[in-house]
Amino acid sequence: MQFIIDNWYLIFIALVSGGLLFLPMLRNAGGGISPQQAVQLMNREKAVLIDVCEPGEFAAGHVNGAKNVPLAQLQERLPGVVKNKSLPVVLVCASGMRARGAAAIARKLGYENAQVLAGGLKAWREAGLPVEKA
C-alpha cells in the first residue's frame, strides 16, 4: 500500500497511457468495416456498395461500382436498388457519419447485413483503392 501512495504519479501515468492505447478502438466502436474488409465482402459475398452522398458529391468521386442513393431517399429507394436482403450492404459517405444513420435505416428495412465503411470515402482513398468520377 505504501508503494501505491509513494508512486501514485507512476500509476496515474500507466493508467492514462493504457487508456490512450484503447482510444482508437473506442472511436471505431460505432461499428464499421475497413476498406480491406469491404473489398473482401465484395469479392467473396457479392456485397453491394451504396453511397449515401448527395448526387454532386457522388459525381465528384465515389467507390468503383457504388450505387448512389442519397440518405434522404434511402428508405424509399433501397428496396428497389438491393432486392436481395440477405446480401451484405456496405454504406459509404464522405467520412462515415451519414452512413451510420443509413445503416440504421437499412436494418429497419430488413437488411441485417448492413455495414458501414469506417472512415468513408476518405479512408477508401487513404487505403489507395480506386475511386471513379461520374
Image (cartoon, rainbow, N blue to C red):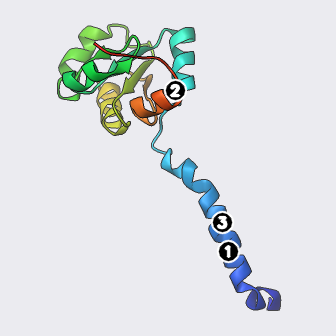
In the rendered image, which residue does mark 3 sit on?
17
The residue carrying mark 2 is 35
User: Which quarter of the picture shows residue 120?
Assistant: top left
Placement of 37 over or under 3, stated as above or below: above
Q: Secondary structure at mark 2?
A: helix
> Is residue 110 something one can see in this rendering?
no
Image side of residue 18 versus residue 69, left or right = right
In this rendered view, identify the residue nearer to me: 102 or 21: 21
The amino acid at mark 2 is: Pro
Quadrant containing the C terminus is top left
Residue type at mark 3 is Ser
Question: Could you say whether the residue bearing mark 1 is in a helix, strand or loop?
Answer: helix
Quarter location, residue 101: top left
Instruction: Read off the residue under disc 1.
Output: 13
CB under 8 Å between callouts 3 and 1? yes
Coordinates of residue 124 in the picture (x, y in percent)? 47, 27
Looking at this view, is 82 or 56 the one in front?
56
Mark 1: amino acid: Ile
Q: Which comes before the other along the chain, label 2 or label 3?
A: 3
